[in-house]
């Protein structure tokens, strides 16, 4: 620690493994107030007592000071600090990226090049990450944990929204800001290998206590209607889809009907025009060998039959600025309220309606596609925003999630629940296929080991995937823990033109072979699941977790380990 200009350098065996930014780049311990960034400067006093270094530093803001505490132990140190003499809106910690080698972790990253849909830098510092609203209520699969090729790691302990920038504008800095004046608390890990850093982190947040997926979920793909039809779907289309998959030997454990089955969002009733006999539809899907699942959400649109009832009974989250009225949020299908899971009556009402729907139509499981909280809303009295990740996890855990899991994060409950983690929607091109790989590596190594890509072939309303992308994606997914399928290799509808796209027989054959390859790996994958339940180690992981001394492994983007014995190296580019 330097005293003339407060900075922290972390060393192991005499070599630097992590260093904060300096005054020339905006300072190490920063705070934002009155529209301007300020930072700690000269150390004005310090004490060492009971294993903790306590210090005070002047700042660039007259009258304001920084008070910091550093508590070291064998493989980490705790850093907490706060500002006195001012009321900042934001506190920030800044690092010199190159001091630690390459950077990883974070989860699904917002980037100037289209991330997370078409871009996921690996390592993070080889691109740019500009991720605002990085917080516990985010729909992104993220955690405030980063680790480096130097075997250092950073975990920020906060329930507040962060603003994270890694190499923004190619500035070579990692900025980890918290939108709060509360004390900034972080753990810095120092180990010999990145895997050991990961294990230290899991020791804090917890590893999975179980897996929510069954052996069959790991062994066979789930087929979901979304990328095949998007919202142009009805009973006839879904039955033709199921029949085609069955007739061409494209096996799967479940067929899920995604968005556009409800009469309105929040009603939890079938649209009678598009689905004249949902009971018969369900029976036919079962006859073809599939379980049946439905897409559901906690959003209740304002024009839904159920909105007024839910609002009148206090079942919706309250508005953050006016707690006397329900919070209204805009999502991708309109304006809605959100069921308040912290209200026991609201949670019971919502779950009862789900179970009635499932019992009536023989529905085995659900795909929850929702946020459990929104920063525009107020948490129920006695609860914090982070509690809603836990409440959402407990809700989902009462239902069969059919191998597509749920997007909960940040909270220890989410880590312990062992949900399958699916990615945000991807495009349908080669860039999205490559992003799906590095994104799985990122998610898997922040403590969510049961990963699957977005739907094979992508699902973000782009032109239908080419034969080459669809096949290579299926082959890539066959070497991951689970397979999440939608676009049929028989034929699909191009959402941008409304025209049918027919694939050739080779596409069907190669896709079927990928499914068979994954099925052959299933006993091995299941063994890795059991190992993960014992250790918390990721199943799909970067090569350097297993080969930490191979420096080339730290920048490889198209290979990974599936457990200790399978090296996956699929084709991820349009090369001959």
Image (cartoon, rainbow, N blue to C red):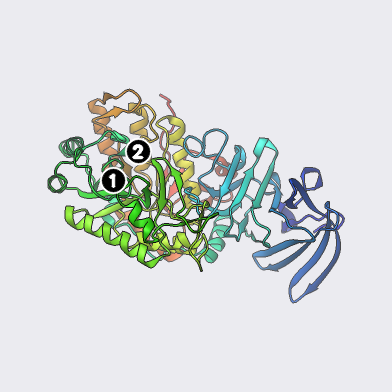
Residue 403 seen from this side: no
In the rendered view, does 576 fall on the left or right side of 367? right
- Residue 46: image quadrant is bottom right
Where 512 sits versus 294, above or below? above
**Mark 1 Cα shell of 10 Å, populated few (<14), some (14-19), many (≥20):** many
Q: CA distance from mark 2 to mark 1?
A: 10 Å
**Mark 2 Cα shell of 10 Å, populated few (<14), some (14-19), many (≥20):** many
- First reached walking from the N terminus: tag 2 or tag 1: 1
Where residue 513 appears, x then y in whole percent? 27, 38
| Residue at mark 2 | 456
- Residue 263: image quadrant is top left
Q: Nearer the viewer, residue 72 or 321?
A: 321
Where 233 sits versus 422, above or below? above
Residue drawn at 51 percent across, 59 percent down: 385
Where residue 346 appears, x then y in whole percent? 36, 62
Position of the N terminus, as image quadrant, is bottom right
Where residue 109 appears, x then y in whole percent? 53, 43
Q: Nearer the viewer, residue 70 or 189?
A: 70
Residue drawn at 35 percent across, 25 percent down: 496
Q: Which mark is residue 221?
A: 1
Q: Nearer the viewer, residue 387 or 513?
A: 387
Where 569 sits versus 466, above or below? below
In the rendered view, does 193 fall on the left or right side of 283? right
Q: Nearer the viewer, residue 524 or 114?
A: 114
Where residue 281 appears, x then y in whole percent? 15, 44
Q: Residue furthest bottom?
A: 50
Q: Secondary structure at mark 2?
A: loop
Mark 2 vs 1: CB contact within 8 A: yes
């Amino acid at each position: 620690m330097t005293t003339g200009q407060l900075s922290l350098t972390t060393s192991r065996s005499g070599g630097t493994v992590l260093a904060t930014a300096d005054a020339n780049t905006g300072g190490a311990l920063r705070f934002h107030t009155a529209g301007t960034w300020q930072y700690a400067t000269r150390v004005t006093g310090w004490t060492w007592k009971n294993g903790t270094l306590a210090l005070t530093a002047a700042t660039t803001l007259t009258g304001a000071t920084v008070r910091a505490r550093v508590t070291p132990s064998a493989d980490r140190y705790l850093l907490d600090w706060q500002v006195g003499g001012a009321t900042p809106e934001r506190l920030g910690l800044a690092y010199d990226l190159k001091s630690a080698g390459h950077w990883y972790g974070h989860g699904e990253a917002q980037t100037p090049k289209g991330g997370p849909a078409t871009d996921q830098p690996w390592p993070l510092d080889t691109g740019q990450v500009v991720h605002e609203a990085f917080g516990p209520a985010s729909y992104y699969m993220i955690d405030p944990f980063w680790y480096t090729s130097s075997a250092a790691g950073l975990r920020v302990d906060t329930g507040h929204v962060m603003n994270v920038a890694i190499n923004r504008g190619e500035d070579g800095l990692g900025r980890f800001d918290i939108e709060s004046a509360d004390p900034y608390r972080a753990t810095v890990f120092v180990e010999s290998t990145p895997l050991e850093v990961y294990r230290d982190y899991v020791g804090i947040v917890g590893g999975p206590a179980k897996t929510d997926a069954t052996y069959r979920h790991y062994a066979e793909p789930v087929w979901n209607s979304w990328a095949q039809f998007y919202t142009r779907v009805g009973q006839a289309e879904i039955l033709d889809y199921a029949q085609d998959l069955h007739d061409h030997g494209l096996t799967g454990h479940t067929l899920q009907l995604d968005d556009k089955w409800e009469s309105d969002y929040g009603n939890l009733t079938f649209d009678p025009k598009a689905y004249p006999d949902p009971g018969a539809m369900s029976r036919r899907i079962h006859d073809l060998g599939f379980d049946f699942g439905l897409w559901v959400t906690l959003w209740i649109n304002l024009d839904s039959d159920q909105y007024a009832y839910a609002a009148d009974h206090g079942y919706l989250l309250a508005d953050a600025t006016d707690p006397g009225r329900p919070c209204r949020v805009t999502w991708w299908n309109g304006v809605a309220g959100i069921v308040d899971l912290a209200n026991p009556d609201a949670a019971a009402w919502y779950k009862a309606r789900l179970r009635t729907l499932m019992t009536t139509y023989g529905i085995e499981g659900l795909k929850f596609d929702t946020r459990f909280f929104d920063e525009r809303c107020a948490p129920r009295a006695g609860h914090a925003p982070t509690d809603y990740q836990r409440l959402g996890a407990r809700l989902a855990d009462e239902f069969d999630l059919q191998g597509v899991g749920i997007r909960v994060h940040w909270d220890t409950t989410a880590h312990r629940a062992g949900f399958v983690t699916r990615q945000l929607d991807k495009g349908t091109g080669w860039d999205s296929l490559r992003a799906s790989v590095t994104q799985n590596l990122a998610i898997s190594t922040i403590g969510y080991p049961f990963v699957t890509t977005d739907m094979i072939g992508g699902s973000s309303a782009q032109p239908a995937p080419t034969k080459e992308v669809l096949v290579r994606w299926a082959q890539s997914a066959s070497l991951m823990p689970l397979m999440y399928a939608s676009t049929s290799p028989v034929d699909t509808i191009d959402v941008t033109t409304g025209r049918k796209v027919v694939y050739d027989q080779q596409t069907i054959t190669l896709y079927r072979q990928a499914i068979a390859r994954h099925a052959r790996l299933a006993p091995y994958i299941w063994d890795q699941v059991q190992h993960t339940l014992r250790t918390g180690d990721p199943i799909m992981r970067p090569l350097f977790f297993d080969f930490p001394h191979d420096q080339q492994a730290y920048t490889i983007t198209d290979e990974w380990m599936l457990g200790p014995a399978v090296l996956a190296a699929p084709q991820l580019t349009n090369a001959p």
